[in-house]
Amino acid sequence: MKPIFFLLAVFIAPFLNAQQPAVIQAESETDLIPEGIAIDNRTGTIYITSINRHKIIAVDQQGAAKDFIDAGQDGFLEGLGLKVDEKRGWLWALSVLREGKQFSSKIHAFDLATAKTVQQYGIQDTVPHLFNDL
């Protein structure tokens, strides 16, 4: 996980008005498979979805990473796109999963302050539906 987050920090740091890129501190979970990324411009927190771990990670301005939501919280599937809704204080996230012939795609809204689900919409079908980017 370190090399991936280090590269993300190097490329994102200029958008945060940082003097130098932060090295993100992460010691485990080398199998996250990061996908979506969004920045809260008010706090500088970077949010990253994990396809493999079915969760969202938050990285603060000092580079410390922690789980924003737990794996599978409130039905969160393979994490895809993200968008910070600064007006509402929400993090919109998309997740998807294929199980045999069943396809599930969901839109989640999490409160940025509490990480609690405030809204959630989904579809499950035998026809592939993929909510991907916001």
Image (spheres, rainbow, N blue to C red):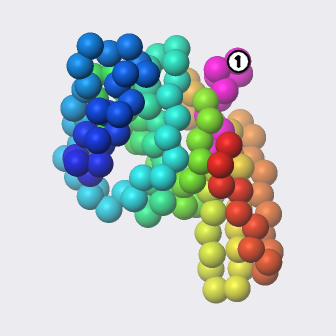
Task: Identify the residue at image location x=35%, y=25%.
Answer: 13
- Residue type of the residue flagged with mark 1: Lys
Vertical side of 68 occupied by 55: above or below = below
Name the image quarter holding residue 59.
top left
Residue, x 71% and y 36% (percent of image)? 118
Judged left or right of residue 51, residue 18 is left
Q: Nearer the viewer, residue 3 or 86?
A: 3
Residue sitting at x 65%, y 49%: 133
- Where residue 9 appears, as percent x and y from the top left, is 31, 33
Q: Which range of residues does the magenta coloring cover?
A: 85-93
Tell me if residue 90 is in the magenta stretch: yes
Up-down relation of residue 78 to residue 112 (above or below): below
Task: Give the camera-side residue of 119 and 6.
Answer: 6
- Disc 1 target residue: 87
Q: Secondary structure at mark 1?
A: loop
- Res. 74 visible in picture: no
Quadrant location of residue 21? top left
Would residue 115 appear left or right of 24 to someone viewing this image? right
Q: Is residue 79 visible?
A: yes
Report x, y in % for residue 31: 32, 62
Query: Residue, x 75% and y 40% (percent of image)?
Result: 119
Please provide percent x and percent y for residue 77. 58, 60
Is 55 drawn above or below residue 86 in the view shown?
A: below
Left or right: where 4 falls relative to 36: left
Q: Residues within 10 Å of mark 1 (few under 14, many from 20)?
A: few
Is 67 magenta? The answer is no
